[in-house]
Amino acid sequence: MSRKQVFGEWKKGWGVVLASALGMGVASMTIYSVGIFMEPLQKEFGWSRTEISSGLTITSIVSVFSAPFMGLLIDRAGARRIAIIGVTLYCAAFACFSLATPSLWVWWGLWFAYAFTAATVKPTVWASGVSSMFLKGRGLALSAMLCGTGLGSSLTPIVGNYLIDALGWRLAYLGLAAFWFILVGPAVFLFFTSAKDLHRTRPDTELVVAPLVGVTAREGLLSWRYVRLASAAFLVALTVMSLVANLVPIITSQGLARQQAANLAGLVGLTTVAGRLTGGFLLDRINGNLVGAMSVCFAVAACILLLIWPGSIFVSAVAVGLLGLSLGAELDCVAYLTTRHFGMRSFGVLFGTISGLLALATGLGPLLVSLTYDLSGSYDIVLMACIPLILLSAFCFLSLGRYPDFEQG
Protein backbone atom coordinates (compact mmCIF):
# COMPACT_ATOMS: atom_id res chain seq x y z
CA MET A 1 0.00 0.00 0.00
CA SER A 2 1.42 3.38 -1.06
CA ARG A 3 1.86 5.72 1.91
CA LYS A 4 1.91 8.64 -0.49
CA GLN A 5 -1.50 7.67 -1.86
CA VAL A 6 -2.96 7.20 1.62
CA PHE A 7 -1.60 10.58 2.71
CA GLY A 8 -3.09 12.15 -0.42
CA GLU A 9 -6.50 10.66 0.35
CA TRP A 10 -6.43 11.99 3.93
CA LYS A 11 -5.22 15.40 2.76
CA LYS A 12 -8.23 15.67 0.45
CA GLY A 13 -10.79 13.83 2.56
CA TRP A 14 -10.10 14.72 6.21
CA GLY A 15 -12.99 17.17 6.25
CA VAL A 16 -15.39 14.49 5.05
CA VAL A 17 -14.24 12.16 7.85
CA LEU A 18 -14.58 14.93 10.46
CA ALA A 19 -18.08 15.91 9.34
CA SER A 20 -19.10 12.24 9.15
CA ALA A 21 -17.80 11.53 12.66
CA LEU A 22 -19.86 14.45 13.97
CA GLY A 23 -22.80 13.10 11.97
CA MET A 24 -22.44 9.74 13.70
CA GLY A 25 -22.41 11.61 17.00
CA VAL A 26 -25.69 13.40 16.33
CA ALA A 27 -27.24 10.16 15.04
CA SER A 28 -26.61 8.56 18.45
CA MET A 29 -28.26 11.43 20.34
CA THR A 30 -31.55 9.62 20.96
CA ILE A 31 -30.03 6.33 22.13
CA TYR A 32 -27.85 8.03 24.74
CA SER A 33 -30.56 10.45 25.88
CA VAL A 34 -33.44 8.04 26.51
CA GLY A 35 -32.07 7.03 29.90
CA ILE A 36 -31.61 10.56 31.24
CA PHE A 37 -35.15 11.60 30.27
CA MET A 38 -36.83 8.52 31.80
CA GLU A 39 -37.13 9.81 35.36
CA PRO A 40 -38.59 13.24 34.52
CA LEU A 41 -41.03 11.69 32.03
CA GLN A 42 -42.12 9.11 34.62
CA LYS A 43 -42.72 11.85 37.18
CA GLU A 44 -44.61 14.00 34.67
CA PHE A 45 -46.85 11.39 33.05
CA GLY A 46 -46.61 8.23 35.18
CA TRP A 47 -45.48 6.11 32.23
CA SER A 48 -43.50 2.91 32.67
CA ARG A 49 -39.95 2.63 31.40
CA THR A 50 -41.13 0.16 28.78
CA GLU A 51 -43.65 2.70 27.48
CA ILE A 52 -41.03 5.45 27.38
CA SER A 53 -38.41 3.36 25.59
CA SER A 54 -40.95 1.83 23.17
CA GLY A 55 -40.10 4.66 20.80
CA LEU A 56 -36.78 2.98 20.06
CA THR A 57 -38.68 -0.10 18.87
CA ILE A 58 -40.78 2.09 16.58
CA THR A 59 -37.58 3.57 15.15
CA SER A 60 -36.10 0.11 14.56
CA ILE A 61 -39.18 -1.11 12.70
CA VAL A 62 -39.39 1.99 10.51
CA SER A 63 -35.65 1.73 9.76
CA VAL A 64 -36.07 -1.74 8.26
CA PHE A 65 -38.26 -0.26 5.53
CA SER A 66 -36.81 3.25 5.20
CA ALA A 67 -33.08 2.38 5.10
CA PRO A 68 -33.05 0.69 1.65
CA PHE A 69 -35.02 3.55 0.08
CA MET A 70 -32.70 6.10 1.66
CA GLY A 71 -29.77 4.14 0.24
CA LEU A 72 -31.33 4.25 -3.22
CA LEU A 73 -31.76 8.02 -2.89
CA ILE A 74 -28.10 8.37 -1.88
CA ASP A 75 -26.97 6.39 -4.92
CA ARG A 76 -29.00 8.61 -7.23
CA ALA A 77 -28.76 12.07 -5.64
CA GLY A 78 -25.54 11.90 -3.63
CA ALA A 79 -25.11 11.98 0.13
CA ARG A 80 -24.35 15.69 0.65
CA ARG A 81 -27.83 17.14 0.13
CA ILE A 82 -29.42 14.37 2.15
CA ALA A 83 -26.98 14.98 5.03
CA ILE A 84 -27.54 18.75 5.11
CA ILE A 85 -31.33 18.47 5.01
CA GLY A 86 -31.26 15.41 7.26
CA VAL A 87 -29.34 16.97 10.14
CA THR A 88 -31.79 19.88 10.14
CA LEU A 89 -34.91 17.71 10.09
CA TYR A 90 -33.47 15.23 12.58
CA CYS A 91 -32.66 17.88 15.19
CA ALA A 92 -36.06 19.51 14.64
CA ALA A 93 -37.82 16.16 15.15
CA PHE A 94 -35.85 15.54 18.35
CA ALA A 95 -36.83 18.99 19.63
CA CYS A 96 -40.50 18.06 19.06
CA PHE A 97 -40.30 15.53 21.91
CA SER A 98 -40.74 18.60 24.12
CA LEU A 99 -44.37 18.67 22.91
CA ALA A 100 -45.23 15.36 24.60
CA THR A 101 -48.57 15.16 26.41
CA PRO A 102 -49.98 12.56 28.85
CA SER A 103 -51.30 10.64 25.83
CA LEU A 104 -49.07 7.74 24.81
CA TRP A 105 -50.48 8.00 21.30
CA VAL A 106 -48.95 11.48 21.01
CA TRP A 107 -45.64 10.12 22.32
CA TRP A 108 -45.66 7.28 19.81
CA GLY A 109 -46.65 9.69 17.03
CA LEU A 110 -43.67 11.90 17.81
CA TRP A 111 -41.40 8.85 17.64
CA PHE A 112 -42.96 7.73 14.37
CA ALA A 113 -42.24 11.13 12.79
CA TYR A 114 -38.75 11.13 14.28
CA ALA A 115 -38.04 7.65 12.88
CA PHE A 116 -38.29 8.87 9.28
CA THR A 117 -35.88 11.75 9.89
CA ALA A 118 -33.47 9.37 11.63
CA ALA A 119 -32.97 7.55 8.33
CA THR A 120 -31.32 10.68 6.92
CA VAL A 121 -28.45 10.57 9.44
CA LYS A 122 -27.89 6.81 9.60
CA PRO A 123 -24.41 5.33 8.97
CA THR A 124 -25.31 4.73 5.31
CA VAL A 125 -25.23 8.48 4.62
CA TRP A 126 -21.86 9.11 6.25
CA ALA A 127 -20.26 5.85 5.07
CA SER A 128 -21.27 6.64 1.48
CA GLY A 129 -19.32 9.88 1.61
CA VAL A 130 -16.25 8.48 3.35
CA SER A 131 -16.06 5.27 1.29
CA SER A 132 -16.24 7.19 -1.97
CA MET A 133 -13.42 9.56 -0.98
CA PHE A 134 -10.99 6.87 0.21
CA LEU A 135 -9.62 3.77 -1.47
CA LYS A 136 -6.27 2.71 0.02
CA GLY A 137 -7.08 4.18 3.44
CA ARG A 138 -10.77 3.35 3.46
CA GLY A 139 -10.73 1.01 6.46
CA LEU A 140 -9.13 3.50 8.84
CA ALA A 141 -11.27 6.34 7.48
CA LEU A 142 -14.47 4.40 8.19
CA SER A 143 -13.21 3.52 11.66
CA ALA A 144 -12.41 7.17 12.43
CA MET A 145 -15.89 8.11 11.24
CA LEU A 146 -17.54 5.56 13.52
CA CYS A 147 -15.61 6.87 16.52
CA GLY A 148 -18.09 9.74 16.41
CA THR A 149 -20.51 7.56 18.34
CA GLY A 150 -18.07 7.75 21.24
CA LEU A 151 -18.40 11.53 21.13
CA GLY A 152 -22.15 11.13 21.24
CA SER A 153 -22.04 8.72 24.17
CA SER A 154 -19.90 11.20 26.12
CA LEU A 155 -21.54 14.54 25.31
CA THR A 156 -25.23 13.68 25.12
CA PRO A 157 -25.72 12.41 28.71
CA ILE A 158 -23.62 15.22 30.21
CA VAL A 159 -25.25 18.07 28.28
CA GLY A 160 -28.73 16.56 28.51
CA ASN A 161 -28.56 15.99 32.26
CA TYR A 162 -27.29 19.54 32.83
CA LEU A 163 -30.13 21.00 30.76
CA ILE A 164 -32.75 18.92 32.59
CA ASP A 165 -31.50 20.14 35.97
CA ALA A 166 -31.24 23.76 34.81
CA LEU A 167 -34.26 24.14 32.53
CA GLY A 168 -36.57 21.15 32.93
CA TRP A 169 -37.10 18.26 30.53
CA ARG A 170 -39.10 20.14 27.88
CA LEU A 171 -36.50 22.85 27.35
CA ALA A 172 -33.79 20.21 27.67
CA TYR A 173 -35.10 18.50 24.54
CA LEU A 174 -34.94 21.84 22.71
CA GLY A 175 -31.52 22.68 24.12
CA LEU A 176 -29.97 19.31 23.32
CA ALA A 177 -31.26 19.48 19.74
CA ALA A 178 -29.86 23.00 19.35
CA PHE A 179 -26.50 21.98 20.86
CA TRP A 180 -25.99 19.17 18.35
CA PHE A 181 -27.26 21.19 15.40
CA ILE A 182 -24.82 24.02 16.14
CA LEU A 183 -21.99 21.50 16.56
CA VAL A 184 -22.73 19.38 13.50
CA GLY A 185 -24.65 21.53 11.00
CA PRO A 186 -21.82 23.91 9.97
CA ALA A 187 -19.27 21.08 9.68
CA VAL A 188 -21.58 19.07 7.40
CA PHE A 189 -22.35 22.11 5.26
CA LEU A 190 -18.69 23.11 4.90
CA PHE A 191 -16.92 19.76 4.61
CA PHE A 192 -19.21 16.84 3.85
CA THR A 193 -19.44 15.57 0.29
CA SER A 194 -19.14 12.38 -1.74
CA ALA A 195 -17.78 11.25 -5.07
CA LYS A 196 -21.31 11.37 -6.50
CA ASP A 197 -21.68 15.01 -5.47
CA LEU A 198 -18.26 15.91 -6.84
CA HIS A 199 -19.06 14.23 -10.14
CA ARG A 200 -22.19 16.36 -10.35
CA THR A 201 -20.67 19.73 -9.39
CA ARG A 202 -17.09 19.33 -10.67
CA PRO A 203 -16.96 16.45 -13.17
CA ASP A 204 -13.29 17.01 -14.04
CA THR A 205 -12.02 17.25 -10.46
CA GLU A 206 -9.18 15.05 -9.27
CA LEU A 207 -10.68 14.84 -5.78
CA VAL A 208 -12.69 11.78 -6.70
CA VAL A 209 -10.37 8.99 -5.60
CA ALA A 210 -12.74 6.01 -5.53
CA PRO A 211 -14.29 5.04 -8.89
CA LEU A 212 -18.02 4.41 -8.72
CA VAL A 213 -17.87 0.89 -10.13
CA GLY A 214 -19.40 -2.32 -8.88
CA VAL A 215 -22.54 -4.44 -9.13
CA THR A 216 -26.05 -3.12 -9.63
CA ALA A 217 -28.45 -3.12 -6.70
CA ARG A 218 -30.35 -6.07 -8.20
CA GLU A 219 -27.19 -8.11 -8.76
CA GLY A 220 -26.01 -7.43 -5.23
CA LEU A 221 -29.29 -8.09 -3.43
CA LEU A 222 -29.84 -11.38 -5.26
CA SER A 223 -26.32 -12.72 -4.76
CA TRP A 224 -25.55 -15.48 -2.28
CA ARG A 225 -22.46 -13.54 -1.17
CA TYR A 226 -24.63 -10.60 -0.13
CA VAL A 227 -26.93 -12.91 1.83
CA ARG A 228 -23.93 -14.20 3.77
CA LEU A 229 -22.63 -10.70 4.54
CA ALA A 230 -26.07 -9.50 5.62
CA SER A 231 -26.51 -12.63 7.76
CA ALA A 232 -23.15 -12.07 9.43
CA ALA A 233 -24.06 -8.47 10.23
CA PHE A 234 -27.52 -9.40 11.54
CA LEU A 235 -26.19 -12.15 13.80
CA VAL A 236 -23.50 -9.90 15.27
CA ALA A 237 -26.00 -7.14 16.02
CA LEU A 238 -28.48 -9.62 17.46
CA THR A 239 -25.91 -11.08 19.87
CA VAL A 240 -23.10 -8.63 20.62
CA MET A 241 -25.29 -5.51 20.71
CA SER A 242 -27.77 -7.30 22.98
CA LEU A 243 -25.01 -8.39 25.36
CA VAL A 244 -23.58 -4.86 25.52
CA ALA A 245 -27.04 -3.35 26.09
CA ASN A 246 -27.63 -5.74 29.01
CA LEU A 247 -24.14 -5.71 30.54
CA VAL A 248 -25.18 -4.19 33.86
CA PRO A 249 -28.03 -6.65 34.58
CA ILE A 250 -25.92 -9.60 33.36
CA ILE A 251 -23.02 -8.72 35.66
CA THR A 252 -25.23 -7.91 38.65
CA SER A 253 -27.08 -11.22 38.21
CA GLN A 254 -23.71 -12.91 38.77
CA GLY A 255 -23.26 -11.33 42.19
CA LEU A 256 -21.51 -7.99 41.65
CA ALA A 257 -22.93 -4.73 43.01
CA ARG A 258 -24.75 -2.43 40.61
CA GLN A 259 -22.13 0.30 40.98
CA GLN A 260 -19.36 -2.19 40.20
CA ALA A 261 -21.28 -3.40 37.16
CA ALA A 262 -21.84 0.17 35.95
CA ASN A 263 -18.14 0.97 36.33
CA LEU A 264 -17.18 -2.14 34.36
CA ALA A 265 -19.73 -1.36 31.65
CA GLY A 266 -18.04 2.01 31.21
CA LEU A 267 -15.03 0.18 29.77
CA VAL A 268 -17.06 -0.60 26.64
CA GLY A 269 -16.69 2.93 25.32
CA LEU A 270 -12.90 2.87 25.55
CA THR A 271 -12.45 -0.59 24.08
CA THR A 272 -14.98 0.11 21.33
CA VAL A 273 -12.89 3.05 20.10
CA ALA A 274 -9.74 0.90 20.36
CA GLY A 275 -11.47 -1.88 18.43
CA ARG A 276 -12.58 0.46 15.69
CA LEU A 277 -9.21 2.08 15.15
CA THR A 278 -7.37 -1.25 15.31
CA GLY A 279 -9.90 -2.88 13.00
CA GLY A 280 -9.64 -0.01 10.53
CA PHE A 281 -5.84 -0.26 10.53
CA LEU A 282 -6.04 -3.99 9.84
CA LEU A 283 -8.70 -3.67 7.14
CA ASP A 284 -6.31 -1.62 5.04
CA ARG A 285 -3.60 -4.28 5.38
CA ILE A 286 -5.12 -7.77 5.48
CA ASN A 287 -8.24 -9.42 4.11
CA GLY A 288 -11.36 -7.91 5.67
CA ASN A 289 -13.14 -11.28 5.82
CA LEU A 290 -10.53 -12.45 8.31
CA VAL A 291 -10.74 -9.20 10.32
CA GLY A 292 -14.51 -9.56 10.60
CA ALA A 293 -14.30 -13.18 11.72
CA MET A 294 -11.56 -12.49 14.28
CA SER A 295 -13.38 -9.49 15.74
CA VAL A 296 -16.63 -11.34 16.43
CA CYS A 297 -14.74 -14.22 18.05
CA PHE A 298 -13.72 -11.84 20.86
CA ALA A 299 -17.38 -11.91 21.89
CA VAL A 300 -17.31 -15.72 22.03
CA ALA A 301 -14.40 -15.54 24.47
CA ALA A 302 -16.34 -12.99 26.54
CA CYS A 303 -19.36 -15.31 26.82
CA ILE A 304 -17.18 -18.25 27.86
CA LEU A 305 -15.42 -16.19 30.55
CA LEU A 306 -18.71 -14.98 32.03
CA LEU A 307 -20.06 -18.53 32.10
CA ILE A 308 -16.98 -20.14 33.68
CA TRP A 309 -16.06 -17.43 36.21
CA PRO A 310 -19.26 -15.63 37.20
CA GLY A 311 -18.92 -12.92 39.85
CA SER A 312 -15.21 -12.23 39.34
CA ILE A 313 -14.46 -8.52 38.93
CA PHE A 314 -11.26 -9.15 36.98
CA VAL A 315 -12.81 -11.72 34.62
CA SER A 316 -15.88 -9.52 34.11
CA ALA A 317 -13.61 -6.60 33.22
CA VAL A 318 -11.77 -8.72 30.66
CA ALA A 319 -15.08 -9.95 29.21
CA VAL A 320 -16.42 -6.40 28.93
CA GLY A 321 -13.22 -5.32 27.19
CA LEU A 322 -13.51 -8.17 24.70
CA LEU A 323 -17.13 -7.27 23.95
CA GLY A 324 -16.08 -3.67 23.33
CA LEU A 325 -13.36 -4.76 20.92
CA SER A 326 -15.84 -6.97 19.06
CA LEU A 327 -18.49 -4.26 18.87
CA GLY A 328 -15.94 -1.69 17.76
CA ALA A 329 -14.87 -3.64 14.70
CA GLU A 330 -18.37 -4.76 13.69
CA LEU A 331 -19.94 -1.90 11.73
CA ASP A 332 -16.79 -0.70 9.98
CA CYS A 333 -16.01 -4.29 8.86
CA VAL A 334 -19.49 -4.63 7.37
CA ALA A 335 -19.32 -1.23 5.63
CA TYR A 336 -15.82 -1.92 4.33
CA LEU A 337 -16.66 -5.40 3.07
CA THR A 338 -19.73 -4.03 1.30
CA THR A 339 -17.51 -1.69 -0.70
CA ARG A 340 -14.89 -4.36 -1.47
CA HIS A 341 -17.24 -7.19 -2.45
CA PHE A 342 -19.89 -5.13 -4.27
CA GLY A 343 -18.19 -1.84 -5.17
CA MET A 344 -19.48 1.71 -4.82
CA ARG A 345 -21.98 1.74 -7.68
CA SER A 346 -24.96 0.71 -5.49
CA PHE A 347 -23.39 1.08 -2.05
CA GLY A 348 -26.29 3.12 -0.69
CA VAL A 349 -28.93 0.49 -1.41
CA LEU A 350 -26.79 -2.47 -0.39
CA PHE A 351 -25.41 -1.04 2.84
CA GLY A 352 -28.73 0.69 3.54
CA THR A 353 -30.53 -2.65 3.46
CA ILE A 354 -27.97 -4.11 5.86
CA SER A 355 -28.39 -1.06 8.11
CA GLY A 356 -32.11 -1.77 8.23
CA LEU A 357 -31.41 -5.33 9.32
CA LEU A 358 -28.97 -4.05 11.95
CA ALA A 359 -31.66 -1.73 13.29
CA LEU A 360 -34.12 -4.63 13.47
CA ALA A 361 -31.60 -6.83 15.30
CA THR A 362 -30.72 -4.00 17.69
CA GLY A 363 -34.37 -3.56 18.57
CA LEU A 364 -35.20 -7.27 18.72
CA GLY A 365 -32.14 -8.61 20.57
CA PRO A 366 -32.50 -6.82 23.93
CA LEU A 367 -36.18 -7.76 23.99
CA LEU A 368 -35.34 -11.45 23.53
CA VAL A 369 -32.63 -11.25 26.20
CA SER A 370 -35.06 -9.73 28.71
CA LEU A 371 -37.76 -12.27 27.82
CA THR A 372 -35.33 -15.16 28.28
CA TYR A 373 -34.32 -13.86 31.70
CA ASP A 374 -37.97 -13.38 32.76
CA LEU A 375 -38.73 -16.99 31.81
CA SER A 376 -35.58 -18.64 33.17
CA GLY A 377 -34.37 -16.28 35.91
CA SER A 378 -30.83 -16.41 34.52
CA TYR A 379 -28.72 -14.96 31.71
CA ASP A 380 -26.72 -18.18 31.31
CA ILE A 381 -29.02 -19.42 28.55
CA VAL A 382 -28.47 -16.14 26.69
CA LEU A 383 -24.68 -16.44 26.97
CA MET A 384 -24.74 -20.06 25.80
CA ALA A 385 -27.07 -19.31 22.89
CA CYS A 386 -24.90 -16.42 21.72
CA ILE A 387 -21.80 -18.61 21.26
CA PRO A 388 -23.02 -20.71 18.27
CA LEU A 389 -24.75 -17.69 16.70
CA ILE A 390 -21.54 -15.64 16.86
CA LEU A 391 -19.50 -18.54 15.45
CA LEU A 392 -22.02 -18.80 12.60
CA SER A 393 -21.46 -15.10 11.96
CA ALA A 394 -17.68 -15.67 11.84
CA PHE A 395 -18.18 -18.49 9.33
CA CYS A 396 -20.30 -16.19 7.13
CA PHE A 397 -17.49 -13.62 7.13
CA LEU A 398 -14.87 -16.22 6.23
CA SER A 399 -17.00 -17.68 3.42
CA LEU A 400 -17.24 -14.42 1.45
CA GLY A 401 -14.25 -15.30 -0.73
CA ARG A 402 -11.85 -13.08 -2.64
CA TYR A 403 -12.56 -9.44 -3.43
CA PRO A 404 -13.83 -9.02 -7.01
CA ASP A 405 -11.71 -6.83 -9.29
CA PHE A 406 -14.28 -4.40 -10.70
CA GLU A 407 -11.63 -2.50 -12.61
CA GLN A 408 -10.94 -5.60 -14.69
CA GLY A 409 -14.48 -6.23 -15.54
Image: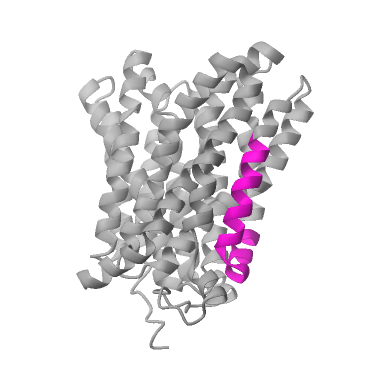
- Residue 249 lies, with reference to residue 18, above or below; the image says above
x, y (%) of residue 395?
35, 58
- Residue 344 lies, with reference to residue 374, above or below; the image says below
x, y (%) of residue 281?
25, 57
x, y (%) of residue 342?
46, 72
Quarter of the image with the C terminus is: bottom left
- The number of callouts visible is 0
- Residue 84 lies, with reference to residue 46, above or below; the image says below
Res 374 visible: no
Please give left or right for residue 43 compared with residue 312 in the image: right
Q: Nearer the viewer, residue 228 or 73?
A: 73
Q: Residue at x 62, y 40 (%)?
A: 91
x, y (%) of residue 171?
64, 23
Q: Residue furthest bottom?
A: 409
Name the magenta segment's main secondary structure: helix
Residue range highlighted in magenta:
68-94
Quarter of the image with the N terminus is: bottom left
Res 296 visible: yes
Q: Nearer the viewer, residue 384 or 406?
A: 406
